[in-house]
Amino acid sequence: MRYISTRGGIQPISFKNAVMMGLATDGGLLLPESYPQISRQQLDGWRKLTYPQLAFEIISRFVDDIPGEALKSLIDRSYASFSHPEVTPVVHQNGIHILELFHGVTLAFKDVALQFLGNLFEYILAERNERLNIVGATSGDTGSAAIHGVRGKQGINIFILHPLGKTSPVQALQMTTVTDANVHNIAVRGTFDDCQDMVKALFGDLDFKEKYSLGAVNSINWARVLAQVVYYFYAWLQVTAEGEKPVYFSVPTGNFGDIFAGYVAKRMGLPIEKLLLASNENNILTRFVNQGDYSLAGVVSTVSPSMDIQVASNFERYLYHLYKEDSSRVRAAFGELREKGRITFSTEEMKQVRRDFCSASVDQLQTLETIGSFYRETGYLLDPHTAVGVRSALDQLPADAVRICLATAHPAKFGEAVEKAIGAPAPVPDSVAQLSGLPTRCEVMDAELEKVKEFVVANIR
Ligand SMILES: *Cc1c(COP(=O)(O)O)cnc(C)c1O
């Protein structure tokens, strides 16, 4: 299996090179040249597999440059860190299925991909006798999951910038209590945007990037999407054991990474009726699906902060397919976005979009209401991101269909919002309670690029 860029500017590359490249060198995103097809018979043969076994079946179809046994061991190690034996169990509540993706170490779905990516990086670096210095900015979830994905790993240092005092307390502790020698937390006196700008500037300094082997872990890495394809198959196999009904997935969406993984599963032949794209007030993608209106607006802060995004980086991968794999169209579309702040679509294209997706936007009031009413009716607590997906599913999807909602975070991770919704503190799991007693390590600094650079250089082992 070889990988190409959505912008058409690179020669096809291997899986391992795609993982190490992250963002394509022509500025596009990497995609496999084709999607392996899974027959119905094959699918039914997978019903008894454990999560890691299923992950191997799916991932190995995209990887032909890592020996089977090594890949298997990498996958097994990645999912052994999950606290639930099923890794991503499905529970049934109030007529919907909830796919719990939060049983990893940082209690959000990003662990599913970043545990795998951490092991993958370590494997490839050892083989090539290379080192990697990961630098990233986070508003909370990605940074903590990335740190836990690479802590203690050979050949890797990680530097994560977060805005001092602006992440949730649990998110901050999940980062700063990791005191492994290869992990460096930087708390910036500033905003998330300050952090993001400095990281962009570091990567923009090509000499610096080259000299210090800088790498990224944001959701544009193909390996992250690939790891997430697995749980769509896993959930589908769980809920279709008896009888056949149309299956919908509701996906709380920010960067379009998670829902694109669902689209890949569909392209591989998994019988998904439609993917429901659930957004908060930052609803550019909902306007796109429902009105064909892909135009930029300002970012609004909400109770589901991991979805407070305007420009969804992974959307480019879908555009490439919508444009029937014509990379010149992708380049033109991003030119239009740069010049006019919008991309326009033909009637035919919008018809295709609505065959793949439906969409709803849920505001903060509705989000908190949904956490409250769901809790009163079932005793089950939703985190605010999951609540956006659940509310969308209840409002938009036929009640007689199979509705699977992706639960992207544990409610304890966003305790403040949950407390507001139910009028009582959210229960705190032991893994979170234990954090407050642990030693922490974190460098606090002003939002000055030179200071950050100096710190990175001084701490590369
Ligand atoms: C990152 C995140 C999302 C959004 O996922 P995307 O892949 O960016 O669409 C939703 N919920 C939670 C809890 C997250 O951490």
Image (cartoon, helix red, strand yellow):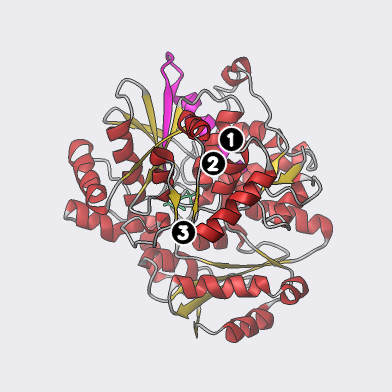
Q: Which residue is mark 3?
A: 141
The answer, for residue 29, to whether it is visible in the render is yes
The answer, for residue 116, to whether it is visible in the render is no
Does residue 402 lie above or below 119 as drawn? above
Which structural element holds mark 3?
Answer: helix
Using the rendered view, name the quadrant where residue 181 is placed: bottom right
* Label 2 crowd bin: few (<14), some (14–19), many (20+), radius 10 Å: many
| Magenta stretch, residue numbers | 226-253
Frontmost of labels 2 and 3 is 2
Q: Amino acid at mark 2?
A: Phe
Mark 3 Cβ and ligand 1 under 8 Å apart = yes
Could you tell me which quadrant the C terminus lies in?
A: bottom right
Relative depth, front residue between 303 and 356: 356
Q: Earlier in the sequence, mark 2 or mark 3?
A: 3
Disc 2 from disc 3: Cα separation: 19 Å
The residue located at (66%, 72%) in the rendering is 204
Assess whether residue 134 is covered by the magenta stretch: no
Q: Are marks 2 and 3 in contact (CB under 8 Å)?
A: no
Q: Which mark is residue 264?
A: 1
Image coordinates of residue 2 in percent, x first then y, are: 77, 40
Mark 1 Cβ and ligand 1 under 8 Å apart = no
Q: Are marks 2 and 1 in contact (CB under 8 Å)?
A: yes
Mark 2 Cβ and ligand 1 under 8 Å apart = yes
* Label 1 crowd bin: few (<14), some (14–19), many (20+), radius 10 Å: some
Q: Which residue is mark 2?
A: 260
The residue located at (62%, 83%) in the rendering is 455
Disc 1 from disc 3: Cα separation: 23 Å
Q: Is residue 303 left or right of residue 102?
A: left
